[in-house]
Amino acid sequence: MAWPIHEKIQRLLKERKKRKKDLASHLNIAPQTMTDICKGRSAVTLQHLRGIMSFFGLRADYWMDDSREEPNESDRLPTATPPPGAAEMEAATESEGRPVHIIPLDRQEQPVRSTSGRTDDSTAEEGKQGQQGETSG
């Protein structure tokens, strides 16, 4: 028997005691659109699939394989591990009562570089100088 995505969604919502409205909110779509998806009347887009994966914590392989009704252990998305020292930071934050946002090193903002390899700031500054030179000539 084939298990299309919409049937898997319905089964997992019921099993996990979640509502279509919860999933619709997670996907940032109208509840009626979620109802249409669950009934097989609307297609699941790539954007929807990404949201469904994160909502249920299951890899795309499970959702795309219509020969399987039940997910197996390898279908589970890995959970993020907190960076070293995160527990200590959280404990310190709780005692001080102030929120602290930890940004992993790989997600910290880097200067945006133009195709010439210069940062946007240097390019903007050169543009200003060029405009000044044009008006004085």
Image: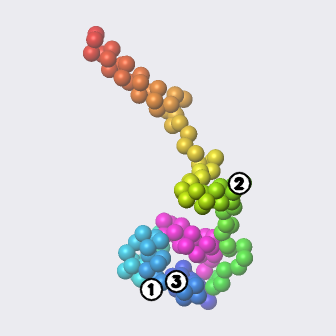
Type of the residue with mark 3: Lys
Left or right for 5, reference 81: left
Do the residues under discs 3 and 2 have CB atoms within 8 angstroms?
A: no
Dot placed on the residue nearer the N-terminal end, 3 or 2: 3
Q: Nearer the viewer, mark 3 or mark 1?
A: 3
Q: CA distance from mark 2 to mark 1?
A: 46 Å
State which region is magenta. 46-66
Whole-percent x and y of residue 48?
A: 48, 70
Q: CA distance from mark 3 to mark 1?
A: 16 Å
Quarter containing the N terminus: bottom right
Please tell me whether mark 3 sits on a helix, a strand or a loop.
loop
**Residue located at (52% from left, 28% from top):** 118
Considering every residue shown, the one lying at the far front of the view is 95
Which residue position holds label 2? 85
Do the residues under discs 3 and 1 have CB atoms within 8 angstroms?
A: no
Type of the residue with mark 1: Lys
Please tell me whether mark 2 sits on a helix, a strand or a loop.
loop
Q: Sort mark 2 into few (<14), some (14-19) or many (20+) by Cα contacts within 10 Å.
A: few
Q: CA distance from mark 3 to mark 2?
A: 34 Å
| Quadrant housing residue 100 | bottom right
Which residue position holds label 1? 39
Q: Which mark is residue 18?
A: 3
